[in-house]
Image (tube, rainbow, N blue to C red):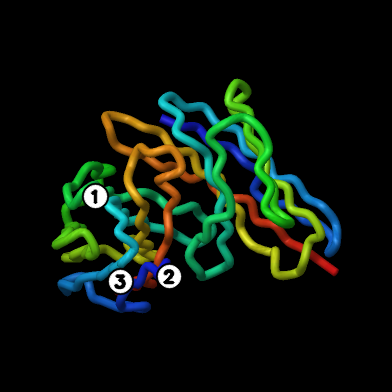
């Protein structure tokens, strides 16, 4: 199984809503990532979890709250978002950070988020 | 940190060969990746280089020169389905963690 799954595929939410994005992989990968991607732009790294611990937070606003319940699951909790947060949110996983050839990332299909 | 540069857009003809260049500046280099991304879809892995030289995979090849901070992706026998964005991503190890950074991507348009 070389698949990273993400739910939901599409999400529309108001600025006062609380919602969560979910990501799952069963490849035994120990690093998981959240990226934000705007149209015609490259993916921007938001968070990195390494062995279920948050290792990188790229100065992301606190209205985005990541959670890694176990080595297969990664959540992104959303609260009080702004319209400019509308984007494609990509989850990725890799075997382990820092290993040559070991950090090839496998991406999920993404969640298309629209904030009204 | 990295400074990754690649052309914004390229066009080519079906059946031809195209080379997409990527230059970067980084410390703690841990490899360079190329990904393909079709519009509205997730990036998919194409190639990985950590040592100097050419890696060939079917119609796609990737080259790396670490001393020059330079890589290219070579696509042969272009097909219409190769129209996509091609992302150069540099992996940098910092403080024991892996920090991947993507270039802005090169939009390749293949026409008949």
Q: Chain of mark 2?
A: A
Q: Is residue B99 above or below residue B18?
A: above
Q: Chain of mark 3?
A: A
Q: In the drawing, what numbered circle is on residue A31?
A: none
Q: Residue at x 38, y 39 (%)?
A: A99
Disc 3 target residue: A115
Label 1 vs 2, first from the N-terminus = 1
Disc 1 target residue: A49
Tell me the element at label 2: loop
Q: What x and y, as percent, mark residue A41? A: 50, 54
Q: Is label 2 or label 3 in front?
A: 2
Q: Is residue B9 above or below residue B68?
A: below
On the rendered structure, is A105 left or right of B12? left
Q: Nearer the viewer, residue B87 or A31?
A: A31
Label 3 vs 1, first from the N-terminus = 1
Q: Chain of mark 1?
A: A
Q: Residue at x 58, y 54 (%)?
A: B46
Q: CA distance from mark 2 to mark 3?
A: 19 Å
């Amino acid at each position: 199984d070389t698949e990273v799954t993400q739910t939901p595929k599409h999400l529309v939410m108001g600025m006062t809503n609380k919602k969560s994005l979910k990501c799952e992989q069963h490849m035994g990968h120990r690093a998981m990532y959240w990226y934000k991607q705007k149209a015609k732009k490259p993916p921007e790294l938001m968070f990195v979890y390494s062995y279920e611990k948050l290792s990188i937070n790229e100065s992301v606003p606190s209205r985005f709250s990541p959670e890694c319940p176990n080595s297969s699951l990664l959540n992104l909790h959303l609260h009080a978002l702004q319209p400019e947060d509308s984007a494609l949110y990509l989850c990725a996983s890799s075997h382990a950070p820092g290993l040559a050839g070991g950090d090839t990332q496998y991406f999920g299909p993404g969640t298309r988020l629209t904030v009204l | 940190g990295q400074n990754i540069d690649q052309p914004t857009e390229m066009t080519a003809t079906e059946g031809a060969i195209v080379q997409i260049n990527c230059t970067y500046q980084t410390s703690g280099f841990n490899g360079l990746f190329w990904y393909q991304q079709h519009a509205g879809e997730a990036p998919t892995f194409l190639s990985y280089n950590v040592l100097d030289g050419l890696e060939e995979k079917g119609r796609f090849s990737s080259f790396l020169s670490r001393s020059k901070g330079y890589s290219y992706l070579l696509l042969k026998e272009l097909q219409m389905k190769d129209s996509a964005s091609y992302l150069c991503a540099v992996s940098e190890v910092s403080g024991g963690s892996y920090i991947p950074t993507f270039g802005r991507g090169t939009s390749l348009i293949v026409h008949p």
